[in-house]
C-alpha cells in the first residue's frame, strides 16, 4: 500500500456507530486458530475498489484491526449512490458475513480504540491543510473573477461590499493557514495533541466552508457551475465537515479540554 500498488480502505464507521466509535458492534470471534467476522461498515471511502480493507471489530480483547483482502468469501462492498459531495471517490457499505481470516490477519500493535483513533489523528492533521488549500483556491478564483467582472459600470472588486468580503476571507484564510502551520510545528516538536488537532479541524473547516460560500456569491450564477472550482470545493467540504470527526464532536473535545467536563453523552 505504501508503494501505491494496492488500494486500501479504512472501515471504522458502522450504521449505528458514527461519531462514537466506542459503540461499534462488528464482532470478531476466535474459531480455532482463525478469526470470524460479522457486521456492516458504512460510508467507507474506496470500499469497492480497495484491494484490502482494514476493518475494526470488537473482540474479547477490545477493539482490534483486521486485514480483509478483497475477494475473501463472505466479504462484499456496495457503493452508496447519488452522492453530491466527494464524487471523485466511491463510498461504500462493507458487509461481512462469516468472514474467516487467518490468525495473523489481526494488526498486532493496535489494541483498543487508540488504534483507529491514532490513524484518525494523522488523517485529521492532514485534513487541516487540505481545507486551507480548498479555501485558497476559492479565494484566488473569486479575486480574479471580481477583478474581471463589471457590474454597474465598474469592476465588482471595486465595491466596498465586495472588498469587505475579500478582506474578511483573506483574514480568515491567513488565520487558518497560521493555525495549520503552528500545528505542523507542534507535530514536528512531538507536542501535538488530539485536542489541538480538533481545534485545527474545527476552525479550518468552519472557515473554509464559509469562504467557499462567500466566494460562490461573488461568482454569481457562474458560481453554481463546475466551470469554476468553488461549488465543487463547497460540496466536498460538506463531507469533510462530517468525516474524520464531525464539527460537533470536535467542539465537544475542545469543550472537555477547556472545562474538564465531558459532555458527549
Ligand atoms: C464522503 C464520506 C467518506 C467517509 N469515509 C469514511 C471511511 O473511509 N471510513 C470510515 O470509517 N468512515 C467514513 N466516513 C464516515 C464518517 O466518519 C461518519 O459519517 C461520521 O463519523 C458521522 O457519522 P454518521 O454519518 O453516522 O452521523 P450520525 O451519527 O448520524 O450523526 C448525526 C449528527 O449528530 C451529531 N452528533 C453526534 N453525537 C453528538 C453529540 N454528542 N452531541 C451533539 N451532536 C452530536 C453529529 O456530529 C452529526 O452532526 C465517511 C463519510 C463521508 C460522508
Image (cartoon, rainbow, N blue to C red):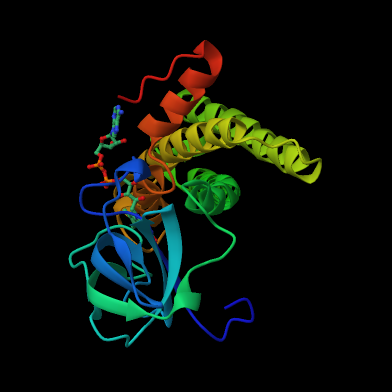
- In the rendered image, residue 46, in percent from the top left (x then y), is placed at 38, 72
Instruction: Tell me what residue is drawn at x 38 percent, y 63 percent.
Output: 227
Looking at the image, which is closer to me, 189 or 39? 39
- In the rendered image, residue 59, in percent from the top left (x then y), is placed at 37, 57
Looking at the image, which is closer to me, 195 or 129? 195
Q: Name the residue at the right extreme.
A: 189
In the figure, residue 10 lies in which quadrant? Answer: bottom left
Is residue 155 visible from the viewing direction of this image? no
- In the rendered image, residue 48, in percent from the top left (x then y), is placed at 31, 77
In the figure, residue 88 lies in which quadrant? Answer: bottom left
Ligand 1 located in image quadrant:
top left
Q: Name the residue at the top extreme.
A: 259
Does 130 appear above or below 252?
below
Q: Name the residue at the front extreme.
A: 32
Instruction: Tell me what residue is drawn at x 64 percent, y 35 percent.
Output: 193
- Give the quarter of the figure containing the C terminus: top left
- In the rendered image, residue 109, in percent from the top left (x then y), is placed at 59, 60
Is residue 223 visible from the viewing direction of this image? yes
Does 17 appear above or below 227?
above
176 relative to 215 in the view: left or right: right
Looking at the image, which is closer to me, 51 or 29? 29
Instruction: Tell me what residue is drawn at x 48 percent, y 33 percent.
Output: 202
160 relative to 190 in the view: left or right: left
- Give the quarter of the figure containing the N terminus: bottom right
Looking at the image, which is closer to me, 164 or 239? 239
Amino acid at each position: 500500500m505504501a508503494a501505491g500498488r494496492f488500494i486500501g480502505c479504512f472501515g471504522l464507521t458502522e450504521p449505528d456507530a458514527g461519531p462514537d466509535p466506542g459503540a461499534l458492534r462488528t464482532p470478531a470471534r476466535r474459531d480455532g486458530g482463525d478469526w470470524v467476522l460479522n457486521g456492516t461498515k458504512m460510508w467507507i471511502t474506496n470500499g469497492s475498489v480497495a484491494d484490502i480493507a482494514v476493518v475494526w471489530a470488537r473482540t474479547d480483547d477490545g477493539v482490534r484491526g483486521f486485514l480483509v483482502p478483497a475477494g475473501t468469501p463472505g466479504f462484499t462492498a456496495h457503493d452508496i449512490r447519488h452522492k453530491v459531495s466527494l464524487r471523485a471517490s466511491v463510498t461504500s457499505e462493507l458487509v461481512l458475513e462469516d468472514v474467516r481470516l487467518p490468525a495473523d490477519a489481526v494488526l498486532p500493535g493496535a489494541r483498543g480504540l487508540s488504534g483507529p483513533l491514532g490513524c484518525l489523528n494523522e488523517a485529521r492533521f492532514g485534513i487541516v491543510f487540505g481545507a486551507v488549500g480548498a479555501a485558497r483556491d476559492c479565494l484566488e478564483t473569486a479575486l480574479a473573477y471580481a477583478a474581471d467582472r463589471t457590474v454597474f459600470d465598474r469592476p465588482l472588486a471595486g465595491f466596498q461590499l465586495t472588498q469587505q468580503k475579500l478582506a474578511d476571507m483573506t483574514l480568515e484564510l491567513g488565520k487558518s493557514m497560521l493555525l495549520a502551520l503552528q500545528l505542523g510545528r507542534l507535530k514536528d516538536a512531538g507536542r501535538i495533541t488530539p485536542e489541538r488537532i480538533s481545534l485545527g479541524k474545527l476552525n479550518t473547516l468552519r472557515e473554509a466552508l464559509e469562504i467557499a460560500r462567500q466566494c460562490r456569491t461573488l461568482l454569481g450564477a457562474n458560481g453554481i457551475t463546475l466551470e469554476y472550482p468553488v461549488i465543487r470545493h463547497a460540496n466536498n467540504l460538506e463531507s469533510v465537515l462530517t468525516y474524520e470527526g464531525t464539527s460537533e464532536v470536535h467542539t465537544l473535545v475542545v469543550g472537555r479540554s477547556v472545562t474538564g467536563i465531558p459532555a458527549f453523552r
